Each structure stands twice: as C-alpha cells, then as structure tokens.
Image (tube, rainbow, N blue to C red):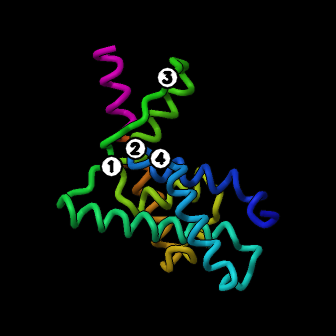
C-alpha cells in the first residue's frame, strides 16, 4: 500500500478517462490491482509501479475487447455512457470531452490520456507502448485533431438544437 498510495490518484484518472463509456473505472482498477498484486514479486523497479499498473490495465482492456469482439462481433465504446447528474458547465464539458476521447482509435485515446490527463512524457508513453517517440507524437497530433473535430461538431449541434 505504501508504494501504491502515491500513484493512486494518477492511476484512477487514467482508468476513468480510458474506460469512459466502456465499463466502470473501479472494475478496471480492481482487476488491475489484483493482477499486479499477484505479480508483485516480478516488478524489478518498485518506483515504476504506475507504469506497471497502466501497462497491466491496458492489457486487461485489450483482452476484454478481444473477448467482447469474439462474442458479439463488435466493440461498442458508447454502450453505457455515464451522464453527469449535475448540470454545471464544467461537468458537461468534462462529459463531452470524455465522450469524444472514447470515440478515438485506441492508440490515440491511450496516448492522449497518458500525456494530457496522467502527465506521462512522450518518452514514457513510447516505452510503455514499445514504439518510437515519433509514433507517439503522431498519435497525439492525430488524436488532438480528431478531438477538435468531434468537439466542434458537438458544439455546433448543441448551439443548433440547444
């Protein structure tokens, strides 16, 4: 617990953003923590526990998505979007952002979440995904462009119908 407590908030932010609309973030956190606990002795550098947690959660999600796709033939990222109950503009904007992030391709979504929300560096993301830094930069660039497009469309619809 002493090793986990300092990274809990960052890990929770990652999980909330990564699974938005897909599943409850607490479920992903629990599954990840159980897996990491079982493999705790295999972690060579305990100071990199956050990277290990995030890497493990990414693998859990990938396995879950493969199972879902095998069972249903499709992956529905927006099957159960959580709607904010408080009507504040900050909650609405956060919900809109998370909905837009959920629509990004997986590699762009994870890169955006890790860089913008969790605070990872480009090098750390590249190491985690086992790709070059230029690939991460490209994913971030494309993800930001797509997010802007998605958010502009939402704002236009909101102004038009709202």
- The residue under label 1 is 77
Q: Are marks 2 and 1 in contact (CB under 8 Å)?
A: yes
Which callout, 3 or 4, points at the residue further toward the start of the chain?
4
Whole-percent x, y for residue 26 in the image: 55, 50
- The residue under label 4 is 24
Whole-percent x, y for residue 142 in the image: 40, 57
- The residue under label 3 is 85
- Front residue (pair 150, 100): 100
Residue located 42% across and 54% down the image: 143
Image disc number at residue 23: none
Which element type, helix, strand or loop, lies under badge 4? loop
- The residue under label 2 is 21
Which callout, 2 or 1, points at the residue further toward the start of the chain?
2
Residue located 48% across and 66% down the image: 58
Whole-percent x, y for residue 4 in the image: 74, 63
The C terminus sits in image quarter: top left
Which callout, 1 or 4, points at the residue further toward the start of the chain?
4
Residue located 54% across and 71% down the image: 56
Eye-nearest disc, 2 or 4: 4
Residue reaching furthest right? 2
Q: Are marks 1 and 4 in contact (CB under 8 Å)?
A: no
* Magenta segment: 150-162
- Front residue (pair 71, 62): 71
- Count neighbours of disc 1 (C-alpha within 10 A) and say few if under 14, some if 14 to 19, many if 20 or more: some
Whole-angstrom CA distance, mark 3 to mark 2, is 15 Å
Whole-angstrom CA distance, mark 3 to mark 4, is 16 Å
Residue reaching furthest left? 73
């Amino acid at each position: 617990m002493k090793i986990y407590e300092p990274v809990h908030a960052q890990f929770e932010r990652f999980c909330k953003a990564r699974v938005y609309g897909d599943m409850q973030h607490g479920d992903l956190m629990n599954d990840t923590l159980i897996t990491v606990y079982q493999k705790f002795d295999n972690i060579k550098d305990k100071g990199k526990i956050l990277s290990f947690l995030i890497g493990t959660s990414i693998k859990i999600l990938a396995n879950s998505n493969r199972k879902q796709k095998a069972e249903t033939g499709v992956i529905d990222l927006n099957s159960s979007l959580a709607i904010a109950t408080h009507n504040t503009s900050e909650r609405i904007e956060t919900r809109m952002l998370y909905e837009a992030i959920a629509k990004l391709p997986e590699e762009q979504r994870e890169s955006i979440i890790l860089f913008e929300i969790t605070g990872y560096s480009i090098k750390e993301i590249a190491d985690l995904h086992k790709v070059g830094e230029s690939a991460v930069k490209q994913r971030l660039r494309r993800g930001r462009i797509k997010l802007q497009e998605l958010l502009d469309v939402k704002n236009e619809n909101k102004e038009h119908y709202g």
